Image: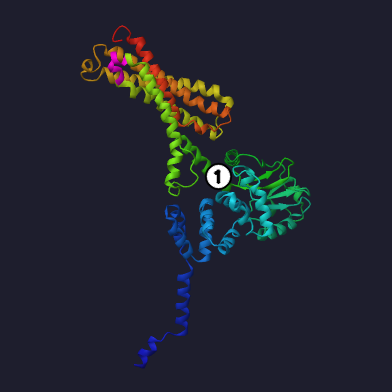
Amino acid sequence: MEDNQKQDIPTSEDAAENTEENIHTLEEVPENEIINLATSWTALPIGERRQKFAALPRTEAEELFLSLTTHDQAELISEFVALEKRSWVRLLAPDDVADVIQEIGLDSREEILNLLDPQTRREVTALLAYAEDNAGGLMSSRYARLRPDMTVDEAISYLRIQAKTQVETIYYAYVLDNNQVLLGVVSFRELFAANPSKMVRDIMKTDVIKIPVNLDQEQIGRIFSQQNLMALPVINDDGQMQGIVTFDDVTSAIQEEATEDIQKLGAVETLDAPYLKISLFELIRKRAGWLGILFIGEMFTASAMGFFQSEIERAVVLALFIPLIISSGGNSGSQASTLIIRAMALGEVRLRDWWRVLSRELMSGLALGTFLGTLGIIRILLWPNKESHYGPHYFHVAITVACSILGVVLWGTVCGSMLPFILKKLDLDPATASAPGVATLVDVTGLVIYFSMASFFLRGLIL
């Protein structure tokens, strides 16, 4: 009996183990669970997101918070009470705080800035002076800096201090003079490989790739992809260094830019939030505008058909091929506009290349139009009971359809390829030359081409 009782009483070692297990269970969350939560975050309802976030221990909550997009961070911060808000805002780097303020809205600017320490507040205020899609709005003002008259040994010691206090990320060390003018850059490999007594000015590289504060994020992304760098220094007009743009900063910016372009290509006004987070009213509003414009444009299709009403009455067979003709032109135009807009975004095509593009698209349009026109002729000539379907002049109808397709596809290709150049020349976004917009334009003109061909080939036969 005593033995049994002894076995039921936990020893101090058992108690310690149990306590440690309980603490481990309560305070630690498996890493894969954090990753899964971050991945599925946007799909969760707002209430569930807040509940799951509040249930996380502080360390895991910080890890999740820093992995979220600016939009999701801003959404969480907006729901926090003042004391919580201060804690989480101070966790962010100055450039990230600036992004959050721009996401929440400038009405909350003073409230957020008042939560920061004086030094960070000055940095964030300076960043907010720049447009969010330019280098100044993307950059971080915390970077590793050195003086040219330092020895290598002094530089390494100084970098250790900076890494603990005022540097967000360290990829390169930038060498500045007393006026903060950028003189050169040093990699850590070069620092550690150099003689400790050597001067920084002797090992730094002076041919530095640098970007101005007003450079657009698309151009920044292009430089990153071409140069294969992890960070780029940002300078003002006087050559003074203002900060650095890192690869991860520009990656998210490029993703946003690509999302905007894709939405515009679909004739949708740019969404300000993920699809499932935007309100139904806002979603309808952003789609209705372009749909209304396209609908009005398509009204001219009815006007064109009304103009050729007598031809349609005399040759009803012509009406059978209207969808085929206009869809071929719209599709070819949509293809061309999509290719050129993307080529412009990647820097593969510039305004001065318009003539080269036009000549290529003319050849492409002729080849594609001939290919589709041939399919049209085959479709009519090999169709069973073609005389009863298309009348005794079915061969002439086939020629009319084939030539119309050739003309419409050629015209659609030219329109789709040249419209982005015209918009670019007018300082407008080429992405607004959306596929539906080009298709609508080609629909109307395609009918004119079709019935003009019909009048030429079928005059005196069925017209």
Q: How is the image coloured?
A: rainbow
Expressed as whole percent of the image width and height from the top left, the position of residue 421 reads 54, 27
Point out the image quarter for the C terminus.
top left
Residue beneath the point at 55% across and 24% down: 354
Q: Position of residue 249 (x, y in %)?
A: 58, 48
> Residue 130, how many percent across, how many down?
64, 44
Q: Quadrant of residue 62?
A: bottom right
For the point 25% across and 16% down, the residue is: 390
Quick check: is 314 in the magenta stretch?
A: yes
Indicate left or right for 450 with 388 as reference.
Answer: right
The N terminus, quarter of image: bottom left
Instruction: Write down the residue under mark 1.
Output: 253
**Residue 140 in view of the camera:** yes
For the record, the magenta segment spans 311-319
Q: Residue at x 44, y 78 (%)?
A: 18
Q: Which one is nearer the viewer's eye here, 28 or 321?
A: 321
In the depicted structure, whether residue 357 falls above or below residue 8? above
Q: Quadrant of residue 250?
A: top right
Asked if 51 appears above or below 402 in the picture, the reply is below
Q: Residue at x 36, y 10 (%)?
A: 456
Q: Amino acid at mark 1?
A: Ala
Whether residue 405 is visible to the viewer of this picture, yes or no, is: no
